[in-house]
Image (cartoon, rainbow, N blue to C red):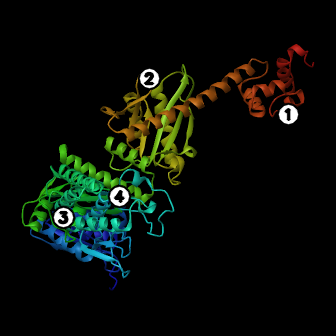
């Protein structure tokens, strides 16, 4: 494609200002003439001109896109809805770099049965020329993998990677045998003939479903009982029970679920994950995941994701449930309804079974995102719960917590601890001595500490490390008083970081989170409660340890300043040189002479103070 003429920002702005205030679609192009972004507008002039004015209010992604725009084209439409339809078509056609695009990597799946004396059943994405038997293809890998896992569990078939008969008798049975989820061929607990019969039963279940499998098992159990084969009848009875339990579980789960799709997004600093749960025919039919760059505008992002998802030849259900508001919801509802040939309802559930489905979807997305980033599951669960509890849009990877410590207003200090990915980052801990005032005022102390911390951020933000990094969440040891004392500081410095307090009960145990409008109970979120309690205990320990250290040094200094000629500065010099009061007491006079800044007569006075009973030197 031939290069096009690069317009300046002023020229682009002037061109945008000449656009009509009517609906349409605009296409941003780079120097090579490639379309890098497609958007729609109710009023083209107003929308497009925003890109080429001030960057204030624009996110990083928009700024980056505008930097690459050499020119733009536009297409007028009769209505905003026509603009939406055209936008969807053009995005699908050109796959622009700066639009959110979901990659459709759905393929066919198969049930694989190895061809040997001890066949193994597994779910695979591709057929191979390996002599195995393949059943399929199926369009849903989720359904295939879940069905195979259920069959292996019900029929107690191995899901490990062992090969039989090679590995028979080499090891003791694993845990699955003892919880009755495997017949342990590895330990010789089942013969080859019985094993093959069991595999055949599992395949009949996978091909015919629960009803056919139950009828077959019931008939065989009754025949075994009539032939007095009570052990065999008992095994068949257990399989019937397992099948019915699995079927009942699915019925209970699907009882309140309509034919619908559920969307939920979980975000971290740089990456986000969309999970789509697809329900139909009274069961969960599919669970799809998409990883993408974290968006700056969630309502706009949801619109782009829903549009992209259903542009990939996905069937549109009667109901779509979202985990939050979307941009242009009426237009998207109209577009989806026309695509489906019937009315499509878009909802954001707030309570009940539908809300539970959204929470399940969000949990799946968080787990997938955690796996993709390699984080520890327990900490990831706690951070996810905490972000949901506090209404945060993204998971707080980097948390700073603060506490004040003093003795009746003396030796007033503060401690700052950092938790990264739910774990203490001790290299980032900081200590503060309160400087602006003397006496006891925890609110003023906390305000001073946060002011100093974020003034340092202004100086060091280019480094992105230590004080040069903004936290994702700030927690203060205390209630709404501490929160209200710090809020004006953050507002004055234009620091936009979520701020909460950590409230203790009368026994000094973590009880709740203090927010601007009240308290948030932690009892319903066990993992989040444990994490907040750990953070509160750690910041308290760190602040108290610093206070004790400083208070102890102050006590030593006061002992030394009682000696004639020793003031605070010389007391500090002595402690810096000898480290402890005991070392000063035991030091010979020659060592005292060697202390920098200590006159000879003062060294003699110090020696005399600690050796009065021995008759010191004159």
At mark 3, the secondary structure is strand
Q: Position of residue 210 (x, y in %)?
A: 19, 60
* Residue 286 appears in the picture as rendered: yes
Position of 189 compared to 310: left or right?
right
Is 353 or 482 nearer to us in this picture? Answer: 353
Residue 269: image quadrant is bottom left
Residue 597: image quadrant is top right
Q: CA distance from mark 3 to mark 4?
A: 26 Å
Residue that badge 1 annotates: 594
Quarter of the picture holding the N terminus: bottom left
Residue that badge 2 annotates: 507
Q: CA distance from mark 3 to mark 1?
A: 80 Å
Is 283 or 361 nearer to us in this picture? Answer: 283
Residue that badge 3 annotates: 41
The residue at the far bottom in this view is: 2
The residue at the far left in this view is: 342
Of mark 3 and mark 1, the one earlier in the sequence is: 3
């Amino acid at each position: 494609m031939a290069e096009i003429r690069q317009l300046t920002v002023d020229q682009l702005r002037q061109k945008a200002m000449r656009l009509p205030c009517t609906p349409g679609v605009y296409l941003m192009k780079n120097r090579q003439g490639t379309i890098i972004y497609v958007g729609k507008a109710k009023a083209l002039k107003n929308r497009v001109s925003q890109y080429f004015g001030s960057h204030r209010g624009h996110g990083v992604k928009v700024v980056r896109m505008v930097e690459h725009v050499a020119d733009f084209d536009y297409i007028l439409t009769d209505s905003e809805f026509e603009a939406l339809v055209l936008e969807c078509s053009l995005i699908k056609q050109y796959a622009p770099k700066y639009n959110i695009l979901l990659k459709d990597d759905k393929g066919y799946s198969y049930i694989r049965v190895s061809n040997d004396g001890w066949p193994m059943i597994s779910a695979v994405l591709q057929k191979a020329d390996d002599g195995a038997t393949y059943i399929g293809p199926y369009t849903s890998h989720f359904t295939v993998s879940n069905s195979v896992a259920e069959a292996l569990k019900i029929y107690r078939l191995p899901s490990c990677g062992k090969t039989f008969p090679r590995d028979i008798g080499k090891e003791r049975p694993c845990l699955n045998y003892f919880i009755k989820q495997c017949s342990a061929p590895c330990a010789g607990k089942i013969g080859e003939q019985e094993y093959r019969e069991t595999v055949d039963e599992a395949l009949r279940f996978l091909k015919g479903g629960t009803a056919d499998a139950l009828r077959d098992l019931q008939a065989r159990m009754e025949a075994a009982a009539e032939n007095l084969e009570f052990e065999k009848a008992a095994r068949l009875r257990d399989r019937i029970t397992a099948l019915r339990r699995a079927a009942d579980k699915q019925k209970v789960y699907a009882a309140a679920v309509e034919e619908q799709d559920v969307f939920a997004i979980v975000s971290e600093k740089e990456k986000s994950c969309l999970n789509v749960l697809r329900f139909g025919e009274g069961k969960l039919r599919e669970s799809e995941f998409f990883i993408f760059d974290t968006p700056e505008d969630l309502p706009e992002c949801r619109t782009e994701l829903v549009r992209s998802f259903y542009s990939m030849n996905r069937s549109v259900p009667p109901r779509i449930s979202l985990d939050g508001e979307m941009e242009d919801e009426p237009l998207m509802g109209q577009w989806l309804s026309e695509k489906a040939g019937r009315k499509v309802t878009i909802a954001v559930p707030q309570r009940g079974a539908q809300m539970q489905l959204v929470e399940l979807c969000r949990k799946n997305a968080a787990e997938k995102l955690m796996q993709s980033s390699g984080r520890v599951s327990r900490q990831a669960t706690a951070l996810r719960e905490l972000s949901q509890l506090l209404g945060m849009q993204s998971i707080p990877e980097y948390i700073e917590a603060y506490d004040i410590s003093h003795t009746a207003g003396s030796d007033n200090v503060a401690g700052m601890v950092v938790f990264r990915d739910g774990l203490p980052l001790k290299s980032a801990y900081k200590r503060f001595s309160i400087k602006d005032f003397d006496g006891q005022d925890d609110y003023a102390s906390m305000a001073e500490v946060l002011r100093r911390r974020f003034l340092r951020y202004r100086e060091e933000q280019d480094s992105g490390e230590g004080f040069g990094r903004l936290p994702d969440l700030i927690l203060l040891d205390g209630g709404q008083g501490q929160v209200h004392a710090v809020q004006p500081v953050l507002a004055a410095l234009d620091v936009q970081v979520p701020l909460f307090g950590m409230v203790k009960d009368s026994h000094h145990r973590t009880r709740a989170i203090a927010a601007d409008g009240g308290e948030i109970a932690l009892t319903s979120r066990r993992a989040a409660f444990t994490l907040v309690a750990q953070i509160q205990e750690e910041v308290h320990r760190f602040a108290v340890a610093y206070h004790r250290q400083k208070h102890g040094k102050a006590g030593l200094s006061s002992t030394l300043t009682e000696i004639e000629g020793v003031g605070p500065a010389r007391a500090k010099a002595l402690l810096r040189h000898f480290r402890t009061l005991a070392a000063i007491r035991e030091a010979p006079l020659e060592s005292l002479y060697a202390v920098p800044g200590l006159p000879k007569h003062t060294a003699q006075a110090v020696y005399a103070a600690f050796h009065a009973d021995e008759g010191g030197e004159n």
